[in-house]
Structure formats: C-alpha cells, structure tokens
C-alpha cells in the first residue's frame, strides 16, 4: 500500500535526520537551476549581455556538454571524497560560477559558467543518488525520493514566485536575482557543513 510505504519512509527519515537534511539541501542546485533557466537566464542574456536567442541556445549546448563530462568523472571523484563533502563543493562552485558570470558579463565567461554549472548539476544528481543507495533500504528509496521531490517542488514554486516578479525584468535588475540565488545556495549549504562538522 502506497500510504503505508510513505508513512514508513517518513518514519525512516525522522529516525535518520542526517539523511533528511542531506536529501533536502543537496537538491538546491537543480531546484534553483530549473527556475533560473526559465526566469533569470533569458533576461540576463538579453539585458546584461545584449545578445539574442542564439546565445541562449548555445548556453544550453555548453551546459549539456558539461553534464556529459560529469557522467565521466563523477564516480571517479566519489572514490576519493565523501559524498557530503563533494556535494558542498558542488554547491559552492555553482554559486561562484554564477557570481563570476554576473560580475564579468562577458560571453566567454558566460559559456564557461554554463559548462561548469552543467557539470555541477549533473554531478550533484549522481552524488545524491549514490548517497541514497548507500544509506536508504531498497524498499524505501522510491518513496523517500517522492518525499524529497515534493519538497523540491515547494522550493521551486517559492523561487518561481519570487523571480517572476516583473521588477527583475527591468534593466540590470536580473543581477540581483542571481545574487539572491547565490544566497539561497549558501543557506542550503550551511546544514550540510554542520552535519560534517559534527562528525569531527
């Protein structure tokens, strides 16, 4: 029964709070990215880079190339670094890439940032699932993912509500949207850092 499975998953996450915290916080990269792609990125290309839809599309291509590279290197990296440490690093790199992108506002930096973010987003997904497979029983992993996806949807909806505000479409105001996004990334990194510090 689905309700019983979800109930068992909730009880499991209550008992293993570190997994709950990781499950919620580790998904912030793709929660923010999917919102950024549809709300902030087109405005940044148009208002800050003064470029067209072609550049927007090419950014998507470089992002996809980054995702492919991620598939090749992530599992090798995970053999040498803890999943939570790597997740923290990925979120920080993502935030730093956005920061460079909005500060420098050059096409080359924009494409490099898109490539790096493609790597970090895909790597975070792989790392996250690796963490879950190691710690969540097989019969619960599907329902726990459902819980995390529901939380992710709430986070995305909140971000969409904020970034859809028409003020961000005026002039260079989209830059403040990215700054807010970077702050959100940092906030979600803090609980992960606390988890790791408690282990020391």
Image (spheres, rainbow, N blue to C red):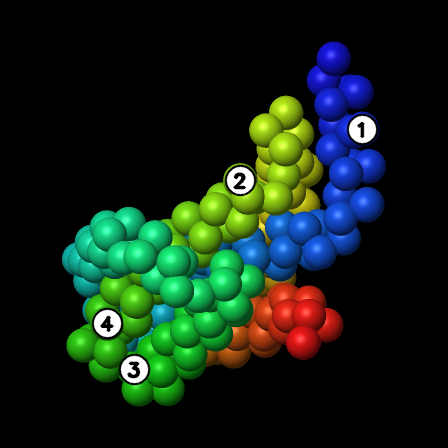
Q: Position of residue 172 (x, y in %)?
A: 42, 79
Rendered view: 33 above or below 49: above
For disc 1, the marked residue is 7
Is residue 195 rendered to the left or right of residue 176?
Answer: right
Frontmost of labels 2 and 4 is 2
* Residue at the disc numbered 3: 105
Cα–Cα gap, marks 1 and 2: 19 Å
Residues at discs 3 and 1 in contact (Cβ within 8 Å): no
Question: In screen coordinates, is 18 left or right of 38?
Answer: right
- In the rendered image, is residue 141 in sight? yes
Camera-nearest label, 3 or 1: 1
Of the image marks 3 and 4, the number of the one nearer the N terminus: 3
Q: Secondary structure at mark 2?
A: helix
The quadrant in which the C terminus is found is: bottom right
| Outermost top residue | 1
Q: Are the two marked residues, 1 and 2, in contact with CB atoms closer than 8 angstroms?
A: no
Determine contact: label 3, label 4, CB under 8 Å: no
Whichever of callouts 1 and 2 sits on the residue coming sooner in the sequence is 1
For disc 2, the marked residue is: 133
Image coordinates of residue 140 in percent, x first then y, are 66, 29
Instruction: Name the N-terminal-most of marks 3 and 1.
Output: 1
Q: Which residue is mark 4?
A: 112
Q: Which mark is residue 69?
A: none
Q: Is label 4 or label 1 in front?
A: 1
Q: Earlier in the sequence, mark 4 or mark 1?
A: 1
* Crowd class of label 3 (few under 14; some 14 to 19; many from 20; radius 10 Å): some
Question: How far apart are the two marked residues, 3 and 1, measured between alpha carbons?
Answer: 48 Å
Q: Residue at x 39, y 64 (%)?
A: 80
The tag earlier along the polypeptide, 3 or 2, is 3
């Amino acid at each position: 029964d689905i309700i019983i499975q979800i109930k068992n998953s909730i009880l499991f996450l209550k008992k293993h709070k570190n997994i709950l915290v990781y499950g919620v916080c580790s998904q912030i990269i793709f929660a923010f990215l999917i919102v950024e792609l549809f709300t902030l990125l087109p405005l940044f290309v148009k208002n800050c880079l003064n470029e067209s839809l072609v550049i927007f599309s090419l950014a998507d291509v470089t992002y996809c190339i980054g995702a492919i590279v991620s598939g090749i290197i992530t599992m090798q990296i995970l053999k040498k670094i803890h999943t939570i440490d790597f997740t923290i690093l990925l979120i920080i790199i993502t935030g730093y890439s956005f920061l460079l992108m909005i500060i420098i506002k050059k096409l080359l930096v924009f494409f490099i940032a898109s490539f790096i973010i493609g790597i970090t987003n895909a790597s975070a997904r792989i790392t996250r699932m690796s963490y879950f497979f190691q710690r969540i029983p097989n019969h619960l992993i599907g329902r726990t993912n459902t819980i995390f996806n529901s939380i992710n949807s709430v986070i995305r909806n909140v971000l969409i509500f904020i970034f859809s505000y028409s003020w961000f479409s005026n002039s260079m105001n989209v830059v403040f949207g990215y700054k807010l996004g970077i702050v959100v990334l940092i906030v979600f990194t803090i609980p992960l850092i606390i988890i790791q510090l408690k282990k020391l």
